[in-house]
Amino acid sequence: MASSLPIGLFDSGVGGLTVAAALRMRLPRESVVYFGDTARCPYGDRSRAEVIQFSREICRVLMDLGVKMLVVACNTATASALPTLAAACPVPLVGVIEPGATAAVRATRGGKIGVIGTSVTIGSRAYERAVHVIRPDVEVVGLACPAFVPLVEQGRIRGPEVDAIVHEALAPLRHIGLDTLILGCTHYPYLSDAIQSAVGPDVTLISSAEETARWVARVLADRDLEAPRDAVPMDQFLTTGDPLSFRRAVDRALGSRASEVRTVALPSGVATVG
Ligand code: DGL
């Protein structure tokens, strides 16, 4: 039965675990299969064509494993590949940009929203478009922060050195009248403390994770795909990188619910799971 299948999620690395954690909070009966393409992370400095190719490969792996819906838990892949993936996807597909933009429009008081993300995401102006579909009068200011993803992948998320890097990177966003800042990369919620202190307490930080989980819940309900009442969730985490450090990141983000961490190889686009 399709409703018993897990939800598939992917990201370039550990960032999308923030979305997996929000899904677990909102939908505790659902199982997830998460794919972190750690070996090819970061995606944010790659070409759009590469991000599309990687995203298609990963979706194929997840579809072959059997999932009832796909969540692109990566802003860079959402900005680059969502329409391409949607055109060939046999299950419902959700990205993180529309949910994040929706939450930001709801939160803004003064109508000036900042968005930080990878170079690909900011260059695509996908957030600006998504915000303007909902409210054309809102001003959106984008800033690429290429230093942040490597910090998170290395597990460096707090301390004076991290604070200094974040503070310097966000200098262009200070004193320009923002009241809301979208964390337009799923890695960035790990740096929330440093980001909040860099932009000041009056700026509301928006992580798309919770809003995306809400969208997923709605899609599952609308399509009659919610996990059965007696479902016992079992999660799987696949990585193209080192399984031990990935296991540590999973435990940190999600606690210790029953789960399995495996390595996946993607030699020249052909996936083998084992
Ligand atoms: N977590 C990702 C995002 O939301 C990807 C970051 C990267 O690999 O550069 O954009």
Image (cartoon, rainbow, N blue to C red):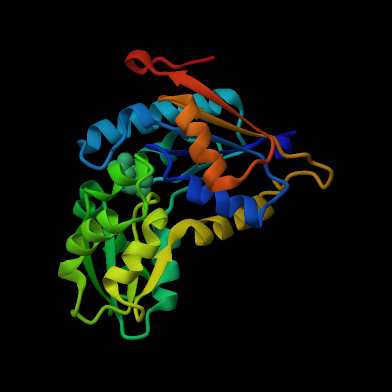
Percent from the top left, x then y, of residue 72?
A: 44, 43
- Residue 91 lies, in percent from the top left, at 56, 38
Q: Quadrant of the N terminus?
A: top right
Q: Report the front residue among 220 and 175.
A: 175
Image position of 149 with respect to 58: above or below = below
Res. 92 visible in picture: no
Which residue is at 41% across, 66% downward? 206
* Residue 142 to residue 241: above or below: below
- Whether residue 8 sits left or right of residue 43 in the image: it is right
Residue 3 appears left or right of 103: right
Classify residue 94 as left or right of residue 197: right
Q: Quadrant of the C terminus?
A: top right
Using the rendered image of the protein, determine whether residue 198 is visible from the camera's viewpoint: yes
Depicted 269 relative to depicted 31: above or below: above
Task: Tell me the residue at 28%/64% (across/down).
Answer: 115
x and y, in percent, of residue 109 in the image: 37, 85
